[in-house]
Image: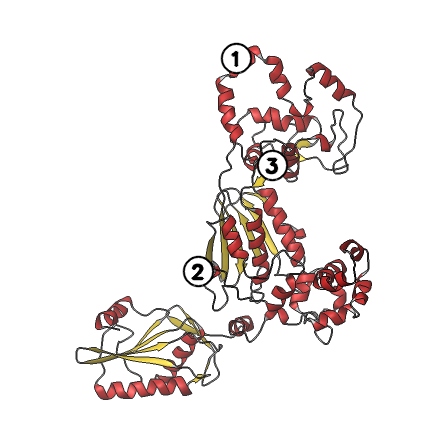
Amino acid sequence: MTKEEILKLRDAAEQTRVQFKERITRDNKYDVCCEMVAQSNTHGGLIVVGIEDKAGCVHPLTFHEAQKTTNLLGSLATEGVVPQILIDIENVQIENGVVIVAYIKEGKNKPYRDGKGIIWVKQGADKRKVFDNAELIAMLMENRQIHPDSMPVNGTNINDLDEKTVKNYLIKRFRNDFERQEFTFSELQHKSLNEIATLIHQTTEGILKNNGLVMSDGRLTLASLMLMGKYPQRWLPAFTVRCVSFVGNNIGGTEFRDKSGGDADGNAVHLYHYIMSFLTRNLRQKQVEKDFNSPGALEVSSATLSEMVVNSILHRSYVIEAPLRVFIFDNRIEIHSPGLLPEGVSMESIRHGVSVPRNRLLFNHGINLLPYTGAGSGIIRALQFTPDIMFKNDETANEFVVILLRKMVEDNNEKNVKVDDKNDVSKKANNKHENNRLSNPILTLPEESDDKKKSEVRNKKMVEDNDEVVPHKKHIPYKFLSGTQKNIIQYCSIARAYKEILNHLGYKYHSRYMSSLIKPLLDIGYLELTIPDKPKSKNQKYRKVKKR
């Protein structure tokens, strides 16, 4: 370090990683030990001796002072910090003497304590004591001395596991054994949990104990409860998910299109499917094939969403008692996972496939229940589908955030609407009959007159579809509807405004869609008005008619 760099540090004043001491004396050497502890427990830093911390005045040390201070710093690092640390010391020559810079590295054996057994961490330019057990556990986790998912949950036993989930786990976990016995997946699905365990020549509890998922005294570990529990939130209420689809792009917005309810609680398998369902129903779909009835593709790759959701469940911190949060805005998707990246993992390294499992048991056994390979290639694969994924290691909020940008869905049909508009007058004059037919497309059958088609539809008997039963005088079976119409019906499971429906489909606002998309579904009883007395109300929304 040069004289100019010393002066730049002085001008910037004390901060998290820089502390000034005019001299180290008998009166303040304990404070210096505490500073070493705090920097070792946080991100490391510098202790600069020869600069006054209050006014920033430089008071260089003489040769004898420098020699004494250098020896004292080394002694404090060895005897005043437990476990002891190694420091680098540099003497920087300036006018009339030297300034001493002690380099404190971030420790790899956290938590560090002072001679009195007190743990310190940095907080801004100052430091504070640590008393919170969760914070201590987080430090132990960084040093791989403890894995929170392997800790027992008091008051639990094997009866608190979901039998169906445990059976699926065993079938996948021991699939090679079952294949050697020539059992098919279908055959195994029809066997009970005890029968499955018998085929492996063990008891279910014995298998789970051998794999570290159940303690010797019968208590469940956090990993087993989160992976296979009937209702983990009974003991772990914070380890759930909260999903919100906002109107606009501000997390402080007061309007939402959709948000999670009590059904968001459950084990990791349930949380995964719940989040994917929430994302799927709130993201737009675009037509990728020429066939109008072909299934659409989400605006963000489903493979990318799956990888990010699995990562957030498996690698979140289970020390921090906070829910996993999924937010959908008009221009982006955000997945907030409690806890920062594990020690030794950087924002750059995760893009190159570096994987350091924070939760060892969850990671090793979740592969038998969740869709991932365990090879650490998930983010690389997601980046292939969605190269513009953004990651944020938010130290202020103590969370890791994945940001996926939403792209406007290109609607080729919208281009056709503009062309249609130009010829709208001539169409009204010359093809009035044709326009009437197009206004209700679900009643259209090829190569038949409109009168004949309408007559046949009216004379059809009521057919109740297995998924939808909607009595109506003009009812048409659900299976005869187009893919777009089914999409609208399912999207309106929650009451939606007209513009919301068009946005979901990727269409720009146009009044003609009311007659071609919404009105037919109202007429045949699949949608209903939330304000039936005022059909043209500006607050009008459309809701899926429930089964009766």
Mark 2: few/some/many CA within 10 Å (<14, 14-19, 20+): few
Find numbered disc 3 in the image and state the secondary structure of the residue it sits on.
loop
Left or right side of 90 for 446: right
Give the mark, 2 or 1, whose residue is nearer the N terminus: 2
Find numbered disc 2 in the image and state the secondary structure of the residue it sits on.
helix
Q: Quadrant of the N terminus?
A: bottom left
Q: Which residue is mark 1?
A: 426
Q: Which residue is mark 2?
A: 348
Q: Foreground mark, 2 or 1? A: 2
Amino acid bearing label 2: Glu
Left or right side of 44 for 375: right
Left or right side of 515 for 81: left
Residue in the image at 72% along x and 18% along y: 454
Q: Foreground mark, 2 or 3? A: 2
Residue in the image at 63% along x and 55% along y: 371
Mark 1: few/some/many CA within 10 Å (<14, 14-19, 20+): few
Q: Relative to 54, is 482 above or below?
A: above
Q: Quadrant of the C terminus?
A: top right
Q: Which residue is mark 3?
A: 496
Amino acid bearing label 3: Arg
> Residue 310: x percent and y percent?
59, 56
Q: Quadrant of residue 87?
A: bottom left
Q: Nearer the viewer, residue 509 or 191?
A: 191
Amino acid bearing label 1: Ser
Q: Quadrant of residue 442?
A: top right
Give the mark, 3 or 1, whose residue is nearer the N terminus: 1
Residue in the image at 59% along x and 71% along y: 147
Quote the CA–CA distance across marks 2 and 1: 60 Å
Give the mark, 2 or 3, whose residue is nearer the N terminus: 2
Quote the CA–CA distance across marks 2 and 3: 41 Å
